[in-house]
Image: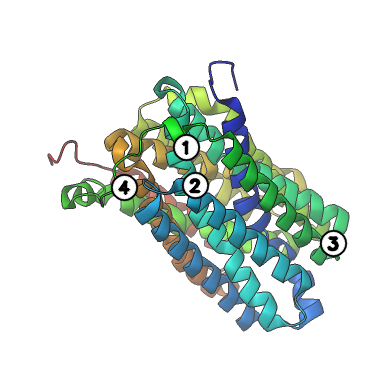
Amino acid sequence: MKRSFSNLPLVVAGTALIAVTYGLVRLAYGLVLPDVRADLAVDAVAAGSISAGASLLYCVGAVTGFLAAARSPRTLVVLAAGTAALGALGVAVSPSAAVFGASAVLASAGAGLASPALVRIVARGVPARDAGRAQTIVNSGTGAGLVAAGVLALVLLPDWRTAWLVSAVCAVLTGAAVLVTDRGARSGPRGNTALPPAAWFRQHGGLLVAALLLGAGSAAVWNLGRAVVVDAGAGGTASVVAWIALGLGGAAVVLTARWLGARPVRTAWAITVLAVALGTVGLGVGAAVVPVAFIACLVFGWGYTAATGVLIAWTSSLAPEHAPSGTSMLFVTLVLGQAVGAAAAGGVLDHVGALLTMLGAALVAVAGIPTARVRQNGAP
């Protein structure tokens, strides 16, 4: 990050909040699940139900952000940090599978609330010349959070409760940091408080399909990646290392933000989705070879995180006044795609094997490249 940012503390704080709500809370569920299942007797059906419930509440949080980000982004930050912290604390002290499940679902809402709030806060707190790069950097916090979750797992597992307690504390601290560094609270523009017009929804039709397909295609790695590595014989530690590689790839988006931002959005979308596909296929081919799995996860992590940043940049360029709403809608669609993709990948893995499952997922993601067409100013 260069000195051209006039509010660097805000960018850092926003990145940290995304790191916690996504990497340390929402996406860490799968990382600790094997140990949780052993301690609390969470069976496979219950684990799947918890995952589905978490995705649903994430969507509820993102829709709430869709409706409220332009008017009340600071309130959304409080809710994001609060739900993530309370949910993580509930997980840490849960005496039963039921309490664990309810807490994990609640914690997932924080990520859905955080993204649209930070899009609005960063847009009003950073000069327009730096806004795109700042949004990309903040969104890349997911990668840093995944790395932190993996490191905590290596250090603490099977003590998953302490890991979630750390996450709860971090949620409170990062939420407070965003509120303190948000200098636009009193001086920045309020933004458009109305819902986008019907033409705006039509304009985003192709982009919504692309987000849906990216979500469906990426679900195989997010949900089955660790299992594929373990089943290939690489071992449990190697699967955690692969998880850390996902995070390192996501964090590397910071290093490529300027380069990617200089590309036309359609080109940037194609590059990032192809990276997701290559990483997915690479994991299917080389899960048993730790260096290959590591590189595949690194490429996938960069592609996925960068692609979500492209979605933010694309909707922001189409309708800046509705950027938080666009982010919320696209991310909801992305998560719905992940729910469908996870079910499909899980259903075919045992029948066709890891390679064909990952290949199929990669093809689904690539199918979203030509569908990412938008209408400019309402024109077809």
Is label 3 or label 2 in front? 2
Which of marks 3 and 4 precedes in the sequence?
Answer: 3
- What element does badge 4 sit on? helix
Q: Measure how far apart labels 4 and 2 are at the Cα level.
A: 28 Å
Q: Name the residue nearer the viewer: 113 or 213.
A: 113
Q: Residue 325's spot in the image, x, y percent?
A: 35, 49
Q: Residue furthest front?
A: 186
Residue visible at 47% across and 27% down in the picture: 126
- Mark 4, residue position: 207
Q: Which mark is residue 74?
A: 2
Say which amino acid is labelled 2.
Answer: Arg
Which of marks 2 and 1 precedes in the sequence?
Answer: 2
Which of marks 2 and 3 precedes in the sequence?
Answer: 2
Say which amino acid is labelled 1.
Answer: Ala
Q: Quadrant of residue 212?
A: bottom left
Q: Measure how far apart labels 3 and 2 are at the Cα level.
A: 35 Å
- Residue 256 sits above or below residue 47 on the image: above
- What element does badge 1 sit on? helix
Mark 3 burial class by Cα count in 10 Å: few <14, some 14-19, many 20+: some
Q: Measure how far apart labels 1 and 2 are at the Cα level.
A: 8 Å
Which of marks 1 and 4 precedes in the sequence?
Answer: 1
Residue visible at 64% across and 76% down in the picture: 101
Q: Residue 267's spot in the image, x, y percent?
A: 37, 31
Q: Which mark is residue 185?
A: 1
Q: Quadrant of the C terminus?
A: top left
- Residue 41 sits above or below residue 371 on the image: below
Q: Measure how far apart labels 4 and 3 are at the Cα level.
A: 40 Å
Which of marks 2 and 4 precedes in the sequence?
Answer: 2
- Mark 3, residue position: 157
